[in-house]
Image (spheres, helix red, strand yellow):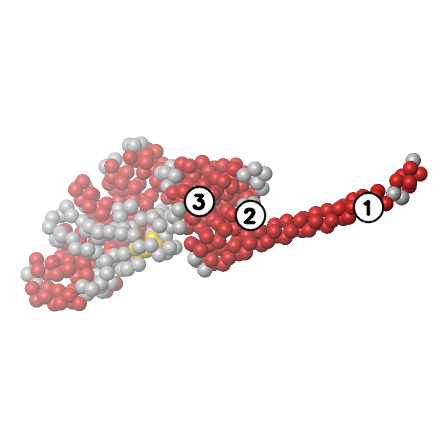
Amino acid sequence: MWNTVWQWSLDPVNQRLLLGIVIAFGIGLIVGRWIHRAKDAKGESMTSKGDKAFFKGVQYMLSNDHDQAIEEFTKSVQVNSDTIETYVALGNLYRSKGDIDRAIRIRQTIILRPNIDDQIKLRALFDLGVDYRKAGFLNRALKTFLKVTQKTPSDVKTLENIERIYEELKDWDNAYRTRQKLAGITKGDYQHILAHHLVEMGKVAQEKEELNSAKSLFNKAISTHRECVDAYLHLGDLYFKKKDYKRGISTWKKAVEAAPRFSFLPYRRLEGAYSKMKDLKPIGDFLKECAQSNADAFTHMALARYLYNENDIDDALDQIRIALELAPSFWEARKFRGEILLADYREKDALTDYKELIEQLNVAYLRFQCTECGFIPGELQWQCPQCKTWDSIQLIDQPKARSIPAAKSKNTLPQLPQGVDEA
């Protein structure tokens, strides 16, 4: 066999054929390697372009140029559609611009990807819940966040979002239970929030005329957080509804003791007591105790109104004097003193008083502000409408009541200035 092959290779024609085959094979090998390298270089070039677009997008994000960031990230995903981080960034950018529909579609695309990392999918699911909530789809958002808790039941941010949604849906029972979970996980002091949830549950029961249940919930709120003024106010309302006026006043008195800075809140409630109670002494005692224990201008003003209604003019004027010493710009007190002086035919004193009043007319009204986000509401609220923080709305001015009619009969008590919620 080998002899035959040797004889064949000695033929010049066969030698030329063999040489051609070797040359062709060599050329094919060289060309093949060149094509492979060209493809790799092209792939690297495309990847490089995608990376450059991504980093440019990050730079634009840091400079708050969201439109340019979206443009660069879009270029990046067109070059390399496998980079999940780019889609996440795009979703966040669209959300920040208010294009929630597009943000939602991007999250859904990430979640539906096969073989995606569980942590990335979970993050996309959380972001989807945030998008739903921002779009106002509260039930969808709640369902999405609950899916996240199936995988990570102790995730604080997810539970906080769930609690806020329950609050917005007025589902106070579930909001309360969610906050209990958060308290257990973080070991934080959230008694004031739990108390507010209990009060809201009590208000719902009160509206349904389930007064015993409401009373129990208000008492539980007080035992949960002693300074929950809203609980005292509504518990006092319940006693008045049952015509137990003394206990109602006693409950409001406890509210003042628990949180003296809100001593002006029960006074509107006392207006109802005038028309229902025959013995007004408990109201007078209550106001006098408040004035003695709290150096608060509005408290002394309320007592002055009460004393004037009882025809004790001199003592009423004395209480107004104390109120003005505490808050010289309390122009409603000055106005009321002028009305008393005119009614008592003390024109000269009234003229002097009104001259002082004119100098104080440029003061601001009673105002409140959130200590967390700076929001200024039109009235006192227990939860900030903007940042949803409980008990962050505080009085930022001395009490300066708006104009209210002078007392004409014994069945009137000082009204709250406009803008103060009854809570």
User: Which amino acid type is marked by label 2?
Assistant: Asn
The front one of 79 and 98 is: 79
Viewer-nearest of labels 1 and 2?
1
The front one of 285 and 358 is: 358
Is residue 256 shown left or right of residue 413?
right
Residue 207, percent from left and from top: 29, 35
User: Which amino acid type is marked by label 3?
Assistant: Ala
- At 39% from the left and 39% from the top, the residue drawn is 138
In the picture of the structure, the residue carrying the numbered disc 2 is 80
Query: Residue 16, labelled with which disc?
Result: 1
Viewer-nearest of labels 1 and 3?
1
The front one of 69 and 201 is: 69
Q: Are marks 2 and 3 in contact (CB under 8 Å)?
A: no
Is residue 186 shown left or right of residue 217?
right
Q: Tag 2 or tag 1, which sits nearer the N-term?
A: 1
Element type at marker 3?
Answer: helix
Q: How far apart, in angstroms, are the residues tagged by discs 2 and 3?
A: 19 Å
Viewer-nearest of labels 2 and 3?
2
- At 38% from the left and 43% from the top, the residue drawn is 135
In the picture of the structure, the residue carrying the numbered disc 3 is 103
Classify 218 as above or below 265.
Answer: above
Q: Quadrant of the N terminus?
A: top right
The front one of 420 and 123 is: 123
User: Which amino acid type is marked by label 1?
Assistant: Arg
